[in-house]
Amino acid sequence: MTSLAAEYDPYILALPGPDSPVVLSQWISSGNTHYNARYWESVWPLAPIIDNPSTSLHKIFWRKCPASLLGEVKLVTWTMLNGRLRPTYLKDRGVQARGRTSASDMRDTCNEWMRLARWLHERRFTSLSDCTEEVWRAYLSERWKDGVSRDYAEKICIALSDLWAFDQLSARPANVTRPPWEVEGIDDILPPADGSASGENSREPLDPQTLGPLLIWAIRFVDDFADDILAAWAERRRLVAVAAANKGVPESLAALADHLLPLIEAGEALPAIRMHGKMSLARTYVSALTGASLSQVGHFSERHRLSDLANERPGPCPLQVPVTGRIDGKPWRTHMDFDEAPELMRHLGTAAIIICLYLTGMRPQEVQGLRSGCCPEPEPDADGTRGRHLIRSRHYKNVTDADGNLISAGEEREVPWVAISPVVHSIRVLERMVPPGELLLSAAHHDFMQQRGHHGALKHQGLNTRVEDFASWANREAKAQGLPDQIIPADPHGAIGLARFRRTLAWHIARRPGGLVALAIQYGHMRTVLDARTASGYGSRSRGGIHSVLDVETALAAADTAAHLRDRMAAGEKISGPAARRAVTAAATTPRFEGRIVPATFAKKAAKFLARDGIVLYDNPDAFLICAFKHDNALCEPEPGATAPRQYACQQGCGNTVRTDTHARQMREKADEIDLKATVVPEKLAKRMRRSAEKLRKAANAHDATAQSAEALT
């Protein structure tokens, strides 16, 4: 009967034998070479179904399961690893329900099943079929008493329902009974929700007073310190290789004594590194400097108690590399140090990660999946100008195959990320830290001390720790450099965390006096990626989603644009363009943003404000104009229903264009700047540049010829 059922029902799997593979071949990608265990083994690695570099290589340990229930739990787990839930089972379970889930979800589900098995064993039950309705209710009540949240209790119910569902797909089912919440509903089983449960991405944005100095230090590391740190790391590695190759000969021992004995006798500091919480003689450094072998340095150190002396009077280990980085015009280090180089490399990678996370809006696992070469230099256009840098990357969330099964390896995003300059610089630094084609956050190549060769990319928890360590280092450095205003204060909502960068958008810092990152940089990038709203749930949050935050940021920027236009007209400036009359109306009717705290209720008002088609003003400094955005007039091809222009695709002749005297002046200044640059480039390119300058002057002249005062337009 089992064979017939398995043959005629594709969802029922044939019974495995002791030597059957834990993961069947159809679920293993061609490039996955991880060890695939056998059914009889006590540890089941899930690595064969893990292709996401940001995911840890999970395992299932069967020692946690009582022997009386081991056979049944093992079989249903094997069925979960290799089977698929029926579409009829998934139909009414929401869009997030999957026939096959991720390896981490499978591991967590199996662990819940084993927890149930231990609970049953303690009560002398010997089979999963003993889970009657009363037993299900008793177990769930026990789990609720453990203090789990309402959200987590719902996940427990889903895992236990999957036990029932996958048991039905087994060639030898244990006859698990249907849990009562499958009939009554979870809300009738669990205590009522108190409204405190948080939805996806309900985490708080980073406080601007924390983010500001954090970003300052991250950009400083990438732009100012990177060359020094990378040179120091290369020199350290060279010295380590030299020390390892040194041979112990009498001449090298004499050189060692000549180098260290005068320091010992004079009571001077010894070259030291920190080991196990205290300072110790820098043996490798000394070996490389003197030519002595490592064993000679070790014996010499023991004979003269140099480790104790180094701990009492530790000295530097200067590297022969230049220091080019500056803080407030002064060198940030007197020398690069052998002992500090690994720590600085770790912080350099963290700084680049912070910039990539915050200034792209990527999810953490999308940054973890970036590879060297993901952001090539753009090809020049016909006029010699270069386009924007684009990041080709993979995304992983909700990536499924044709049958709705989760694809661990993800897939390349159809729309590449647009990279602004700080992000490009960060990627270039990361590319110098790993081999070509390697993951930019390769765990093996970012392990600067122990070189343990870990799998894939640096993992989420480790990166969280690195960000906190980076902030601590920056605070110590700020105090040492006399920069109290650049200390990173603790965030009032807790640890910084990788995922909070994505939640923290430009409006957090754009409204601060002397804001650290111009709104134009973040606004242009985020709107480029998100304005099309290719999915209404992209980055959604229970309090309205990421789009509501973008609407707030956009509305505030538009209010500023209207206020600035109103001020210019009051100062006597004239305006021109086909949308000039609409712009005057918008400037007169738009309230001024006075810098107050933006309440959560403002999101709905912002969306309503932006929906006023034709009288919302968007500043476009790159095109030297204001866009009085009216959807039907726009030549930038906005998406249906869009309430903002594609500012990066602004077209000449658009009916939404507005210019002021200030724009005309800026265009002439830009033309003069282009002409000046044209004097130092090849003639062919110079001609194209001069043509561009002439176009700017013609547009400025057209403004002068047609501009009118606000009074004349009303």
Image: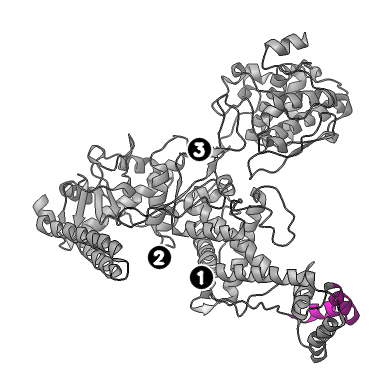
Q: Is residue 102 left or right of residue 399?
A: right
Image quarter for residue 353?
bottom right
How far is the residue under mark 2 from the one under mark 3?
32 Å
For the record, the magenta segment spans 295-315
SS of the residue under disc 1: helix
State left or right for residue 319 relative to residue 68.
left
- On whether residue 299 falls in the magenta region, the answer is yes
Label placed on residue 514: 2
Measured in 3D between alpha carbons, the distance from the residue under mark 1 to the one under mark 3, in whole angstroms, is 35 Å
Estimate the x, y position of residue 298 in percent, counting from the top left. 86, 74
The secondary element bearing badge 2 is classed as loop
Query: How is colour applied across the structure in the image?
Result: one colour
Please give the residue where the numbered disc 1 appears in the rendered image: 485
Up-down relation of residue 660 to residue 392 (above or below): below
Q: How many other residues sit within 10 Å of disc 2, few (<14), some (14-19) or many (≥20)?
A: few
Most distant residue in the bottom direction: 266
Q: Amino acid at mark 1?
A: Asp
Residue at 46% x, 42% y is 546
In the image, residue 3 above or below residue 83: above
402 to 593, vertically: above or below: above
Residue 85 rendering spot, x and y as whole percentages: 65, 21
Q: Nearer the viewer, residue 113 or 297?
A: 297
Which residue type does callout 3 highlight?
Ser
The one of 660 and 340 positioned closer to us in this rendering: 340
Mark 3 Cα shell of 10 Å, populated few (<14), some (14-19), many (≥20): few
Which amino acid does the dot numbered 2 rest on?
Gly
Q: Which residue is mark 3?
A: 542
Q: Earlier in the sequence, mark 1 or mark 2?
A: 1
How far separated are the C-alphas under marks 1 and 2? Answer: 13 Å
Neighbourhood count class around disc 1 (C-alpha, 10 Å): few under 14, some 14–19, many 20 upward: few
